[in-house]
Image (spheres, rainbow, N blue to C red):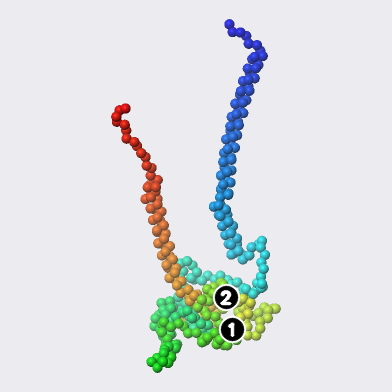
Amino acid sequence: MLSRLPSGALKQASSAARLTRASAVSSSRSASVRFASSSSSTSSNAFESFMNSRLTLASATLFTAGTVAWYAHLYGTLPFLGEAHASHHSDEGLHPVAYPWSHNGFFDSFDHASIRRGYQVYREVCAACHSLDRIAWRNLVGVSHTADEARVMAEEVEYPDGPNDDGEMFQRPGKLADYMPAPYPNDEAARAGNAGALPPDLSLIVKARHGGADYIFSLLTGYIDPPAGVEIREGMNYNPFFPGGALSMARVLFDGLVEYDDGTPATTSQMAKDVVTFLNWAAEPEHDERKKTGIKAVILFSTLFVLSIYAKRFKWGPIKNRKIQYNPPADKSGH
């Protein structure tokens, strides 16, 4: 017969059971807390390693530098940095407008009819003061003139040659291989004929001036009377697009100054547009061929890129990802 337990023992047993349950709950909670803390610490460590990696720092630096450079390209200055100029902003000249030239696009070529008209403007107007040393008569063939037309124009100019059998130099008609003649024999004669100013050679003038074709066009069409308060000394002309505002070259283009062979109206803006197109071609005769070669190169390398992706995906992929498994021979001895 079981002995009867006292009430105190029962109370102690119930309290022990409660303590056991409480400890189990607390242990489970602590385990979950430890698991959560470990997962959070793992994610925080991964984030810290990502933020402290060199690739992240380099990417952030490049992004910041690119953003600052792009802002400076668009607006010229940064809002949090001051500028120090040794001269006034007006000394740099008025910035030209960006005109929609027909050859500006990736797939656009020069307007060759405009090049022909521009050469006519250069020959009848600009060649009196400016040279074109880097352009030969043969460069016009197939671009703006035929070989016969270029040969006739070359023969109108006499070039020194020799010596002959007597050891003397002589004059001969020009050939396609000759370069276009300069208006002055040397720089001193050019300065003497232009009140001390040296007319620049126009072979690379579009590339040599900030703003390129837009600047040349704006300069040729931008002559105005000087505003109030601006004094221009005698012999100078006011043009807001020229640095300083005063230049020796007077306005040379006027409506109807030349008569185009194709009947195009010879307005001031039309002549300026044509001669700037011609000078742009003179500065970059390989422009059209360069773009054609670039298009061919893009097509070729794009095709090679697609073929390389195909070879990587369908040829090398199975070879690089194959799994080699060794199955030992079965023991047939029966042991």
Specify the label residue 197 is tagged with.
Answer: 1
CA distance for labels 2 and 1: 21 Å
- Camera-side residue: 40 or 138? 40
Count neighbours of disc 1 (C-alpha within 10 A) and say few if under 14, some if 14 to 19, many if 20 or more.
some
The quarter of the image holding the C terminus is top left
Disc assigned to residue 218: 2
Which residue occupies 43% across, 65% down? 295
- List x then y, in percent, for residue 67: 59, 59
The residue closer to the viewer here, 60 or 252, is 60
Q: Is residue 304 above or below residue 288?
A: above
At mark 2, the secondary structure is helix
Rendering coords of residue 94 (x, y %): 62, 73
* Marks 2,1: beta carbons within 8 A: no
Q: Is residue 213 visible?
A: no
What residue is drawn where x is 51% and y is 76%?
Answer: 204
In the rendered image, the residue lying farthest to the bottom is 166
Local secondary structure at mark 1 = loop
User: Measured from the top left, where is residue 162 in percent x and y?
Assistant: 41, 89
Q: Earlier in the sequence, mark 2 or mark 1?
A: 1
Q: In this view of the protein, can residue 20 be seen by the observer? A: yes
Q: Is residue 150 left or right of residue 96?
A: left
Name the kind of residue labelled 1 in the image. Answer: Ala
Position of residue 254 relative to residue 43, above or below, is: below
